[in-house]
Image (tube, rainbow, N blue to C red):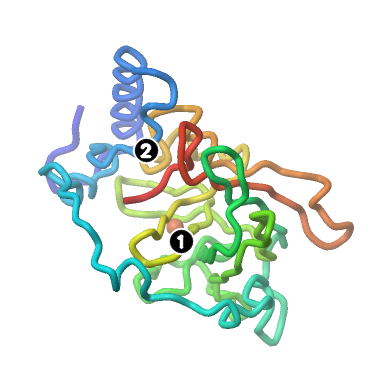
C-alpha cells in the first residue's frame, strides 16, 4: 500500500515499487543495451517526480563560447589533488583505498587529458557540507573532494578513504549504498558528465531507488568497482578499479 501524501513510505513500500518496475521492465524490455540510462521519472526515487522533464527535451546548438569555455589549464591541476588523504595535519579515519581506472570511448580507446573530479562522504557517511547534518562525525582530516587528469592511456588514480553509507529522506529508514560521485569534464562545460561509483557486495543495492533507477541490470552493475588485489599496496591501501565508458552500448550511467 502506498503511503499517504506527505508521509514517509516504508522501505517495504519502496522495495515493492522497485520490484514492480523491474518486473515490468523484464516483461517489456527491448534490445540489450537500449535502456542503460537511469529513469528520470522513477517514482520510488520520490524527488524525481518534481525534477524530471515533463516535455520532450529541446536540442539547442551551444554557442561558440559554450563549446570552449570554461576551460582549465593542465598546469592548474596539481598531482597532489588526487590524494584525498593529504593536505591536513593528520591522517583521515577509515579504510584507505586506491581507486583507479580508465576513461574509454565506445571502441575502448583511451580518452586522455580528461579532468575527473570526485566528491564523497567520509568513512562515517557524512559530507563536509552545511546541508548534511545527520549525527555522524566530521573528520577534520578529510575534505572529501579531489581531481586529476587522465594520462595518455586514459588512466586516472586517486588515493582516498572508503566512504560510509548515509541516511537520506526519500523514505523512512532510507540509506544510500556507499558511493563516490564522479564528474568527467570533457573539453567544455557543456560536455560534463556526472555519475556515481559503488563498491562490490553492498547490502543496500536492492533497497536504493537511485541505484535501481538504472533498470537494466548489466548497466547497473557497470557502476560497481571491482576489488583488484594487484592494485592493493601491502600494509597501506586496498585497491579498486572502475572504468568509465563515454558512449556506446556499454556506456556508463550518467546523471542528466
Ligand atoms: Fe552522495
Ligand 1 quadrant assignment:
bottom left
Return the residue at label 2: 37
Viewer-nearest residue: 155 or 6: 155
Residue at mark 2 to residue at mark 1: CA–CA distance? 19 Å
Q: Label 2's element?
A: loop
Q: Residue at x 57, y 71 (%)?
A: 146
Which residue lies most toward the right here? 234
Task: Give above or below for 81 relative to 54.
Answer: below
Q: Residue at x 34, y 17 (%)?
A: 29
Specify whether 31 is left or right of 151. Answer: left
Specify whether 214 is left or right of 51. Answer: right
The percent coordinates of residue 165 (x first, y second) are 51, 53
Which residue lies most toward the top here? 27
Q: Residue at x 33, y 29 (%)?
A: 18
Q: Is mark 1 within 8 Å of ligand 1?
A: no
Please rate how many residues cluster around mark 2, counting C-alpha atoms within 10 Å: few if below 14, some from 14 to 19, many from 20: some
Quarter of the image containing the N terminus? top left
Task: Give above or below for 77 relative to 199.
Answer: below
Which residue lies most toward the bottom here? 89
Mark found first going from the N terminus, 2 or 1: 2
Specify whether 216 is left or right of 124. Answer: left
Tell me if label 2 and label 1 are in contact, CB under 8 Å. Answer: no
Q: Label 1's element?
A: loop
The percent coordinates of residue 150 (x first, y second) are 62, 62
Return the residue at label 1: 186
Please rate how many residues cluster around mark 1, counting C-alpha atoms within 10 Å: few if below 14, some from 14 to 19, many from 20: some
Viewer-nearest residue: 97 or 65: 65
The percent coordinates of residue 171 (x first, y second) are 30, 45
The percent coordinates of residue 82 (x first, y second) are 64, 70
Q: Residue at x 46, y 61 (%)?
A: 186
Could you tell me how many numbered marks the image carries?
2
Amino acid at each position: 500500500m502506498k503511503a499517504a501524501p506527505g508521509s514517509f513510505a516504508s522501505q517495504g513500500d519502496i522495495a515493492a515499487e522497485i520490484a514492480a518496475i523491474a518486473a515490468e521492465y523484464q516483461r517489456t524490455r527491448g534490445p540489450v543495451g537500449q535502456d542503460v540510462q537511469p529513469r528520470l521519472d522513477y517514482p520510488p526515487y520520490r524527488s524525481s517526480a518534481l525534477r524530471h522533464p515533463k516535455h520532450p527535451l529541446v536540442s539547442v546548438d551551444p554557442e561558440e563560447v559554450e563549446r570552449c569555455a570554461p576551460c582549465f589549464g593542465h598546469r592548474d591541476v596539481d598531482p597532489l589533488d588526487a590524494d584525498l588523504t593529504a593536505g591536513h595535519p593528520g591522517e583521515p579515519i577509515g579504510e584507505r583505498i586506491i581507486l583507479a581506472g580508465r576513461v574509454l570511448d565506445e571502441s575502448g580507446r583511451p580518452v586522455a587529458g580528461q579532468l575527473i573530479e570526485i566528491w564523497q562522504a567520509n568513512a562515517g557517511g557524512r559530507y563536509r557540507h552545511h546541508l548534511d547534518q545527520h549525527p555522524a562525525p566530521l573528520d577534520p582530516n578529510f575534505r572529501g573532494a579531489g581531481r586529476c587528469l587522465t594520462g595518455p592511456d586514459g588512466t586516472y588514480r586517486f588515493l582516498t578513504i572508503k566512504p560510509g553509507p548515509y541516511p537520506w529522506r526519500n523514505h523512512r529508514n532510507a540509506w544510500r549504498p556507499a558511493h563516490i560521485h564522479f564528474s568527467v569534464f570533457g573539453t567544455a562545460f557543456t560536455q560534463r558528465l556526472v555519475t556515481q561509483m559503488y563498491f562490490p557486495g553492498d547490502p543496500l543495492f536492492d533497497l536504493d531507488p537511485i541505484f535501481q533507477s538504472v533498470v537494466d541490470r548489466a548497466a547497473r552493475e557497470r557502476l560497481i568497482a571491482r576489488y583488484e588485489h594487484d592494485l592493493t599496496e601491502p600494509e597501506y591501501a586496498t585497491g579498486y578499479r572502475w572504468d568509465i565508458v563515454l558512449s556506446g552500448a556499454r556506456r556508463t550511467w550518467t546523471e542528466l
